[in-house]
Amino acid sequence: MLKYEKRLHDLSMFALCYMPIEQYFIEKLRDGFIQELKHRSVALQFRTCRELIKATQALKASMSEGQ
């Protein structure tokens, strides 16, 4: 997940005029998640990508513990 976030961030540097707001970046980052994480994180509201990453890591850890 962090690898994906870094790649998306790196590529976004080439398209700054197309990525004007943090919310757009959050949506694109969420789109790259596996289906189960995407569904669980959609109901949550995030102001920054860092908040989304931390919450998703916690969700992923809890999913791993449940298996």
Image: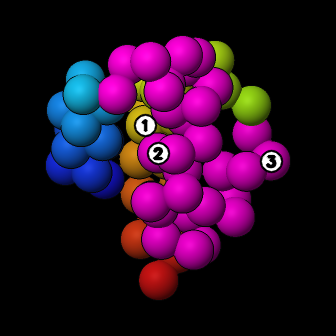
Mark 1 or mark 3, earlier in chain: 3
The spot of residue 50 in percent (x, y) is: 43, 24
Q: Secondary structure at mark 3?
A: loop
Instruction: Tell me the crowding category of disc 2: few under 14, some 14 to 19, or many 20 or more residues within 10 angstroms, Cα based.
Output: many
| Residue 30 visible in the current orientation | yes
The spot of residue 44 in percent (x, y) is: 75, 39
Q: Secondary structure at mark 1?
A: helix
Image mark for residue 53: 1
In this rendering, which labeled residue sits more in front, label 1 or label 2?
2
| Residue 62 visible in the current orientation | no
Residue at point 63% right, 26% down?
Answer: 23
Residue 31 among magenta residues: yes
Image height of 38 relative to 52, above or below: below
Whether tag 1 and tag 2 are in contact, CB under 8 A, the answer is: yes
Residue under circle 3? Answer: 43
Image height of 47 relative to 62, above or below: above
Mark 1 or mark 2, earlier in chain: 2
How much space separates mark 1 and mark 2, taking CA atoms? 9 Å
Magenta region, residue range: 15-44
Image mark for residue 29: 2
In this rendering, which labeled residue sits more in front, label 3 or label 2?
2
49 on left or right of 3 = right
The spot of residue 55 in percent (x, y) is: 53, 38
